[in-house]
Image (cartoon, rainbow, N blue to C red):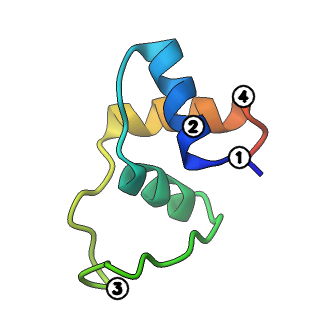
Amino acid sequence: MTTYAQIQDDVRACHNRTVKTCWIAHVKALNGLNPRTAPNRQSSESRVYPCPDDARQWIEESMRRLGML
């Protein structure tokens, strides 16, 4: 199982950008991977920091490279 830290490291290595873990969770939810709900999440219906479109592409590329998608 690929961790969020591994995805962050891969995106940083390939695109020289840092992504938030909440963005990774959002991309997982958009792709039907059902991430766990964080205990400190403020609202179960909305996201405080939704993933931007450019970061979504980087995260999905990384998830494909690491075998999650």
Q: Nearer the viewer, residue 5 or 68?
A: 5
Q: Amino acid at mark 3?
A: Ser
Mark 1 neighbour class, 10 Å CA radius: few under 14, some 14 to 19, many 20 or more: few
Q: Give above or below for 64 relative to 50.
A: above
Q: Residue at x 73, y 34 (%)?
A: 66
C-alpha distance separating marks 4 and 1: 11 Å
The residue that disc 4 covers is 65
| Residue in the image at 32% along x and 79% along y | 40
Tell me the element at label 4: helix
Q: Amino acid at mark 2?
A: Ile
Label 4 or label 1, whichever comes before in sequence order:
1
On residue 43, which mark appears? none
For label 2, the crowd category at 10 Å Cα-Cα, with few meaning under 14, some 14 to 19 and many 20 or more, is many
Decide which of tag 4 and tag 2 comes sooner along the chain: 2
From what the image shows, is residue 2 above or below residue 66?
below
- Percent across and percent down for residue 11 are 50, 26
At horizontal 26% and vertical 84% (from top left) the residue drawn is 43
The residue singled out by tag 3 in the image is: 44
